[in-house]
Image (tube, grey):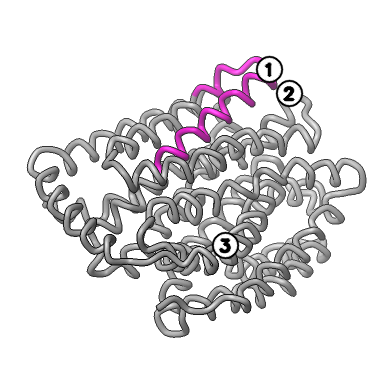
Amino acid sequence: MKSTIRKYAPPIFHCINDFGQGSLAALIPFFITNFGLNYYQSASIIFCNTVVASIAQPILGYVADRWRVPWFIPVGFTVTLVSISAMALATNYEMILALSLLAGVGAALFHPEAALLVNRTQSHEIGNAMGRFAVGGSAGFALGPLIAGGVYVFGAHFLWVFTAIALLGVLMYIYAFTDKADVTNASVCESHSKSVAIGTNDWVSFGKLFFVIASRSILFSVLSIFIPILYITVINGEAGASSLALTMYFAMGAVLTYMGGALSDKLGFLKTVRLGNIIFLPSVLVFIFVPNVWGFFGAMIPMAFGVFSQYGPITVLGQKYLAKNAGFASGITLGLGITLGGLVAPYIGHLADIYDVQTALMTLIPVGALGLLMSFWLKEPK
């Protein structure tokens, strides 16, 4: 029983952590309504969440390479979800920013060690295991907005449900990864360390990969923020339904993340990344400029494929390029791969304030083109 739980616990933990990350974007219309925020201020909430994570995750990934710190996992997702819950007590914009930043600290703690847990305990099937782990995060981003949507019905105090979810995750971790499990994991970790010792790092290729990571991260973060806003301002949908639109997007992402992993086994990691960007570029144009429900949701499918299909392949590429520092690589690919885009989100929001949402979203086209061009400059790892 424990062995089965340990196999599927990492994607479950990833799902729990990303409940919080996904819900934050869905709460933006709620904050706009209740605190009178403009687009720049709204995007700055995501900025605060991501800036600390973007700085801390590579550092914490290096720590995870040097020392075994499994307690980062439950502490990380607990800090993330409790911070989201505490937003129910927020009385001003500054308090929301502070709690958003704290949630980013939790995400920074969680991702590198959680990715290493997959690598250490399931290295014999790393492709499938990392695929499941990535799908867990996508599922969390899909369910987070759905759960957060309860604030539009029940009010801000509904957010305390995230703390209850964190508690369930902690209980699962205690059950699955303590006592005898620690002995098992310690031996696996020792075996993993020996295999890492004979690996090599290709820093040049990883440096090129960083531009692909940054491109995907910007696409992911900006769309996560502006899908509900676009739904309200252009499609003229209701604020409560905007969280459902975001849930649909992330639900597609969960399926398409798995598809991306399966495709990478057949096509190769880089070909899957290239295919994602090629499909993204025309579909995002339709998504932005077809101002009706059918165009909005119809273009969302290929657009989501372009963003989410790259997630698993990029993660594996990073770990293969930096075989001796898989934790650091995971801090970049899984950590910055989600959070880095939030650093530019306020500037996209500022463009939306000056012009309009559709004009601001046109910046995604050169960003996607950059990711595509850089992917052709890379080679498949040995």
Estimate the x, y position of residue 209 in percent, counting from the top left. Answer: 56, 65
The residue segment tinted magenta is 86-110
Q: Which amino acid, mark 2?
A: Phe
Give residue 287's quadrant in the image. Answer: bottom right
User: Which secondary structure is most common in the magenta stretch?
Assistant: helix
Q: Count residues near mark 3 (Cα–Cα under 10 Å), then give few for <14, some for 14-19, many for 20+.
A: some
Callout 2 touching callout 1 (CB < 8 Å)? yes
Q: Which mark is residue 92?
A: 1
Q: Circle 3 is placed at which residue position? A: 207
Q: Farthest residue toward the bottom?
A: 266
Q: Nearer the viewer, mark 1 or mark 3?
A: 3
Mark 2 surroundings: few (<14), some (14-19) or many (≥20) residues within 10 A: few
The residue identified by callout 2 is: 35
Where 80 sits versus 197, above or below? above
Q: Amino acid at mark 3?
A: Gly
Is residue 343 shown left or right of residue 18? right
Q: Residue at horizontal 36%, vertical 30%?
A: 164
Q: Which of these two is toward me, 141 or 160?
A: 141
Residue visible at 45% across and 34% down in the picture: 106
Q: CA distance from mark 1 to mark 3?
A: 40 Å
